[in-house]
Amino acid sequence: MVYNPEDRVREDLGAEALGSQAGRASTRCEESIAAIATPPGHGGIGIIRVSGPAVKRVAYWVLGEEPEPRTARVYEFLDQNKSPIDQGLAIFFNNPHSYTGEDVLELHGHGSPAALDMLMTRILELGTVRLARPGEFTERAFLNGKLDLAQAESVADLIGSRTHAAARAAKKSLEGAFSKEITSFSKNLRELRVQIEAEIDFSDEPVGVLDDDKLRAGLDEAAEALESLLCRAKRGALLGGGAKVVLAGPANAGKSSLMNALLAEERSIVHNSPGTTRDVIESEIDIDGLLLRLTDTAGLRQSNDEVETEGVRRAGNAIRGADLVLLVLDDTNDGTNYHEWLKGVPSRKSTIVILNKCDITNRPYGVIPDFFGEVTVATSATKQLGLNSLLEAIKQQLGYSIMSNEEPFMARHRHLRALESAKVNLAHAAANAKDRRGIELVAEDVRIAQQALAEILGTVSNEELLGQIFSTFCIGK
Ligand SMILES: Nc1nc2c(ncn2[C@@H]2O[C@H](COP(=O)(O)OP(=O)(O)OP(=O)(O)O)[C@@H](O)[C@H]2O)c(=O)[nH]1
Ligand SMILES: [Mg+2]
């Protein structure tokens, strides 16, 4: 038998994992499922969706016939005495030409909770149909190979998107833009691995397939491509999840005033006595499509007041959970010892120092270049000065400003973790490649990197992960 290193690469990653996915599909999808797909409450239209092998029976039961596939027609929706519960459009999608890849029936009735409830009861009376779990329609689409896992996740991201930019990015991922990038990168990695495996197997031969330079160049190229992918995915993740931006700092520095100025509303109470804010106050703003969860906190100071002390403790928690900390200092007094205040922010936390009340100190507002190595902006919350510079600095610190040229795709923290893990493994591979004797370790590192990418698309996945992902969907999707 002629040995082909491709076979090993294929064996390791694809076949087994895909097999297990198909297995899951066949055991899980024997049951038929139904759900109201429109949001709860009264509305113009209410849609019930049914998927699975019992769909044709449901159609006979409720409509009196099996409708023509993919054709919208008006029907009476019938109860067990054949009297109409409601009237509306019915559309039958025969498998595999449907969202889930199974037979699907959609009943578009009136958006009356009572009528929809009666119709659901009628469908469930069949006995072979049960209520769908959250995300189960999309899960079936994934299990039946209609979508990969990253695309399935983008369905939930699109539904949950709160800014135009997030919705556009999710749509792009749903179309497969992110998956395509991952697949293409994974393919290049696979080719590299085939060469490495060949090199290992033919290492006794006088002429190697892959010399040291080629191997290093291949790994460098892969690392570079991965870095760019990671960068775009980070921006996508930011679009999807938004960023938690915490205003923290000494009492009376103007944190609440700044929060209100950024929100253009009187959200937090402002007062000239220190210790005004006692709790953590959150509000959202959309900055060019980036959703910021602005968080105002209690001024950091020692206090004998129990409520204020609790507020300061909560401020500490907010700082630890922040994506970005805005350290607000009163330029009339705290600015000089900003280093002391910086100690209250965990190092490696992305931070912007704000010197507020610059209207009193007459400091020019805006970004202060080279302020002891910190990104620093001078503002006046009351006079609304320096706010645009601050917003720009926030976008930049969060890595959002470089986004304008490329349309981002939506990505999740799960994807970032997988890409980071692939990056670590490629770095290991590069280190092991320095010594020819480490070539088997290089092959293993590249294999693990490939595996991490496969997890993004769901070609390797486990029940727990799928459970986690689909349980966050809404019912009916
Ligand atoms: N002149 C001037 N006064 C300001 C500015 N920002 C805030 N102040 C005033 O400073 C005082 C404190 O403002 P707050 O916004 O309540 O300060 P804070 O940091 O939230 O205070 P605590 O909640 O007590 O920690 C108020 O009297 C504000 O009007 C500013 O930019 N310029
Ligand atoms: Mg305050």
Image: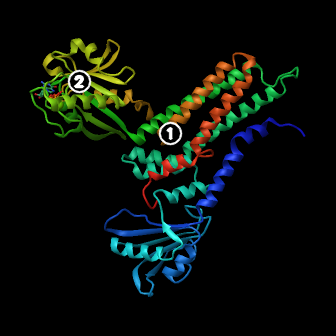
Mark positioned earlier in the residue sequence (2 or 1): 2
The residue drawn where x is 41% and y is 32% is 400
Please give left or right for residue 273 compared with residue 314 in the image: left
Amino acid type at image mark 2: Gly
Question: Residue at the right extreme?
Answer: 1
Determine if residue 36 is in view: yes
State the SS at label 1.
helix
**Closest to the observer, 208 or 360:** 208
The residue drawn where x is 71% and y is 28% is 443
| 128 to 456, vertically: above or below | below
| 245 to 151, vertically: above or below | above
Within 8 Å of ligand 1, the CB of disc 2? yes
Specify few, some or many for label 1: CA neighbours under 10 Å numbering under 14, 14-19, or 20 or more.
some
**Closest to the observer, 211 or 204:** 204
Amino acid type at image mark 1: Arg
| 178 to 316, vertically: above or below | below
Q: Which mark is residue 249?
A: 2
Where does residue 265 sit, x and y in percent of width and height? 18, 40
Where does residue 65 sit, x and y in percent of width and height? 54, 82
**Residue 423 in which image quadrant:** top right
- Which residue corresponds to mark 1? 414
Q: Answer yes or no: do the residues labelled 2 and 1 have beta carbons within 8 Å?
A: no
Please give left or right for residue 48 compared with residue 178 in the image: left
**Residue 260 in which image quadrant:** top left
Please give left or right for residue 263 compared with residue 231 in the image: left
- The CA distance from mark 2 to mark 1 is 32 Å
| 295 to 477, vertically: above or below | above
The residue drawn where x is 62% and y is 44% is 460
